[in-house]
Amino acid sequence: MSEFIPVCEPYLAGREKEYVLECLETGWISSAGKYVKEFEENFASYCGTRYAVGVCNGTVALHLALTAMGIGMGHEVIIPNFTMIASAFAVCYTGAMPVFVDADKETWNIDVSKIEAKITSRTKAIMPVSIFGHPCQMDEINALAKKYNLFVLEDAAESHGAEYKGKRTGNLADISTFSFFANKNITTGEGGMVVTNDENLYKQALYFKNLCFPLEGPRNYLHNEIGFNYRMTNIHAAIGLAQMEKADEYKEMRISNAMLYRKYLKDVRGIRFQHTDSNVLHVHWMNTIVINPVEYGKTRDELMSYLKTKNIDTRLLFVGMHKQPALKNYGCETQESFPVTDWLTDNGFYLPSASNLKEKTIEFICNEIISFRGV
Ligand SMILES: Cc1ncc(COP(=O)(O)O)c(C=O)c1O
């Protein structure tokens, strides 16, 4: 097999083209147009929430959610140290400080047992991230939030359709956000969503998303606060709606790919997968493995280079927030060590994970990993 295998690519197998063409033919290409509302309603119902607000990407979705909760200068938000940089940057946009908690060694999500020690009088919210599609242990997080009167914002950018104790992500916190970037299980190319059951947070999100135009009354072009233009276009929403029509099918494809990787690599020493807790439905956004060089006989970097020669695309994992120069400059310098994050960053990588991977492609990738091992 010499065809290039990308680490991920969008899967657009439904009515995406038909709906987008309709936008072009009717001229409804801005954020006005029926698809935005339809996509929002559809997505809210998929998550099991009352409200959804479409925005232009997952990063601004986080910023909007934080703004809706009134988070700003002088506040702290607890986030996982092992996450995509957008989780931390969104906190910085508000003027608040992100505070880091190391990952759990098994699920790679925020280590819930280490959150309480980070709560101070300035803490306003906890932001768990459902890493690679695995929801966090939300009962414990919500209980802590209740005890200290904090908000919970779930960054569910990677976990469309995932479940914790039978409830979907999006419906596990005060407010949650999603990304629809091209590599996500549900995509609009670029796009995001804020979902909540709280009417007040919903209204705040709608208000700040659209330059703080008043939600009711005449448009007199007077603005009482500084708002943002985070609107989603009708074209993006059209793609999103088509994706939602096949959301469960796409989710099953990702889960099935993850099971195949586990099946073909199960006897290979020195390869570790993300653990799945028994009370969650993990949607396996990306297939990630961590290499133990002693047991596997080669390092992670050697394996990635080898796979490249076989036309198999891979990616490094996130670098911990504690090592980010931008965050250090912002004032997040810390002497604390984050061993689980560092272990993941130094030894882990993504394998090809597109929804429409064929079993024979996964088998080929796994056979290459098996044949390259050094012990
Ligand atoms: C955990 C997490 N949060 C936020 C984002 C930001 O989403 P976007 O790329 O749509 O801005 C991503 C994107 O991959 C992510 O993985």
Image: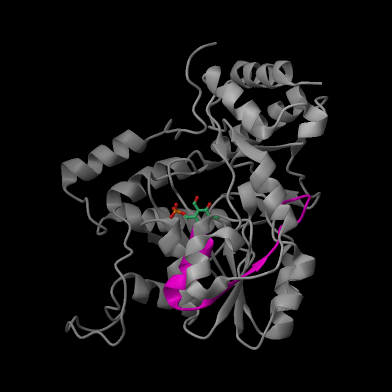
Instruction: Report which quarter residue 302 is drawn in.
Output: top right
Taking the magenta stretch, the answer to whether it contains residue 95 is yes
- The reply to whether residue 75 is in sight is yes
- The part of the image, by quadrant, that contains residue 370 is top right
Quick one: which residue is furthest to the front in this view?
Answer: 335
In-front residue for pair 310/352: 310
Nearer to the camera, 65 or 172? 65
The residue at 31%/84% (across/down) is 225
Residue 308 lies, with reference to residue 138, above or below; the image says above
Position above or below: 88 against 306: below
**As drawn, 118 above or below 41:** below
Residue 320 percent coordinates (x, y):
61, 56
What's the residue at 51%, 57% (across, down)? Answer: 85
Name the residue nearer the viewer: 350 or 154. Answer: 350
Examine the structure image and report whether residue 15 is included in the region drawn in magenta: no
Image location (x, y in percent) of residue 254: 60, 35
User: Range of the magenta residues?
Assistant: 86-108
Instruction: Please say whether residue 270 is visible from this viewpoint.
Output: no
Colour mapping: one colour
Question: Which of 359/49 is in front?
Answer: 359
Q: Quadrant of the N terminus?
A: top right
The quadrant of the rendering that contains the C terminus is top right
Is residue 204 found left or right of 177 in the rendered image? left
